[in-house]
Amino acid sequence: FFDPNCDGKQVMVHLFEWKWTDIATECERYLAEAGFCGVQVSPPSEHVILPENNYPWWQRYQPISYKLYSRSGSEADFIDMVHRCNKVGVRIYVDAVVNHMSGTGRSGTGDGGSSYNSNGDNRDFPGVPYSAEHFTPRNQCPSGDGNVNDYSNPSNVRNCYLVGLTDLYGNLDYVRNMVAGYFNNLIQIGVAGIRIDAAKHMWPEDIAATLSRLNDLPTDQGFPAGSKFYVFQEVIDQNDGAIKVDEYYNTGYVTEFRYCSKIAWGIKDYGQLGNLIDYGWGMARSDRAFIFTDNHDNQRGHGGGGNVITHETPRDYKQAVAYTLAQDYGFTRIMSSYYFTNTDQGPPSNGGYSTADVIINADGSCSGGWVCEHRWNVMKRMVEFRNSVVGTSMSNYWNNGNAVAFSRGNKGFFAMAKQGSMSENLQTGLPAGSYCNIIDDCASSIQVGSDGMAQISINNYEEPILAVCAGGCG
Ligand code: ARE
Ligand code: CA
């Protein structure tokens, strides 16, 4: 569960709410060449449809079956996407919602034709099928109203209903088999791994028992024999409750949300950049930490949002992502968003439920309401940098409060200047030679002497970043 199965590549992108047809094309026209490991896709499982809330993005976090019919497209579109992306070496990671089904008080029919009824005491999901006996018994949940409301109590967090979502009883063999069946179907199609949504609200032993039922990845989709599903688990541990990320180390990586706050502080106050990884804080060990500057929740104030940097402040955001990809902690994901004015607002649409195509402009940027951070030049270049320096650690760390620099072994060197300019003679750790800055597409370069020293100059207000690699990046 620990290998992302992408030939050592280091960065995944979340194409939040993109349609399967657009993702397939994006793998072929951009992601493969840019060196991305893969794509986290929005939940593909059949979900509630909520016209009364104007089809919010979060309707996909209320599954009604494990059929692959969602707002992003049909099962056939999904399979075609996985196959086309695998063919060009870009992996697909599914956002798997298996802690719960729909919210209470809902009924209807999904895109795959499955009916559901969670009104009153009904828990009918014939598309799986699940019925009332498959949901966590009320007497297992210590809260007064049956909902999660006490994060200091593991039974409350894991046995009660998260924001009113009907909680699956993961202790049952039946439930474990149904969830494992869903995952094995994804595996058979060629999906390389999953994000486990709301893993914090599931018992680690239930996750382990479910994953123990999984098959190896299929060799006919280009995976070496014996490859295992990659797993990263959404556990929001901000030192604010009883559940700790390290309870989940046996079943995969864990989301490290403290990193989001830390990088935001670091960009505001460069002096803090040296202290991003704080094991005293309980941050996950590097070979289990799944990190990102922001995600689909905290960029819009859901899921403990707040002090994070997003695409809305592009200059800061470029620095935050650049630093995240330059340093050596964790496995990294970058966000690709759509513009919104309302935090519930769904993706750009053709009116109603139908998601609009992503429009690619002649200069490679996006329009039609899609931000496409992953296509910004700084992000693209830093993906090349991270892939090029894999396996090295940070050294020659230098920070004067306004600018920061470090080497990645003898393979790469990175520098960044908060005010837009710097000029310092620094140890690069690189062999003597001339190296060009990939961030400005090699318009500038540095000359490293036989002692490894170089004059490091940055003069670029919008993108005050320098990244060079021995032998070129990417
Ligand atoms: C929606 C409505 C609710 C309604 C519910 C059921 O907003 O009002 O009661 O439906 O009908 C997303 C949205 C929710 C949405 C849900 C289902 O964010 O608003 O509810 O979909 O449609 C906790 C969890 C963490 C979770 C965050 C949001 O620990 O797992 O809350 N994140 C994931 C996803 C979300 C998704 C879900 C889970 C549900 O990434 O996108 O919800 O599938 C502290 C704690 C954290 C806690 C955080 C916020 O930081 O430490 O544990 O996160 O506060 O409460
Ligand atoms: Ca639960």
Image: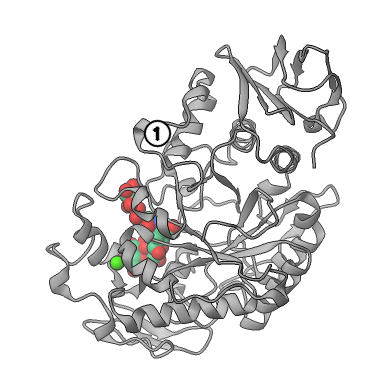
Quarter of image, res 389: top right
Q: Nearer the viewer, residue 159 or 394?
A: 394
Quarter of image, res 41: bottom right
Q: Nearer the viewer, residue 101 or 134?
A: 134
Task: Examine the rendering and report whether any part of residue 160 can be seen.
Answer: no
Q: Residue at 60% of width from left, 41% of height from top? A: 311
Q: Is residue 283 above or below residue 296?
A: above
- The C terminus: image quadrant: top right
Q: Nearer the viewer, residue 210 or 317?
A: 210
Q: Position of residue 265 (x, y in %)?
A: 47, 28
Figure label count: 1
Q: Position of residue 305 (x, y in %)?
A: 41, 44
Q: Is residue 268 left or right of residue 135?
A: right
Q: Quickly name the residue at label 1.
A: 279
Q: Position of residue 240 (x, y in %)?
A: 28, 42
**Amino acid type, mark 1:** Tyr
Q: Secondary structure at mark 1?
A: helix
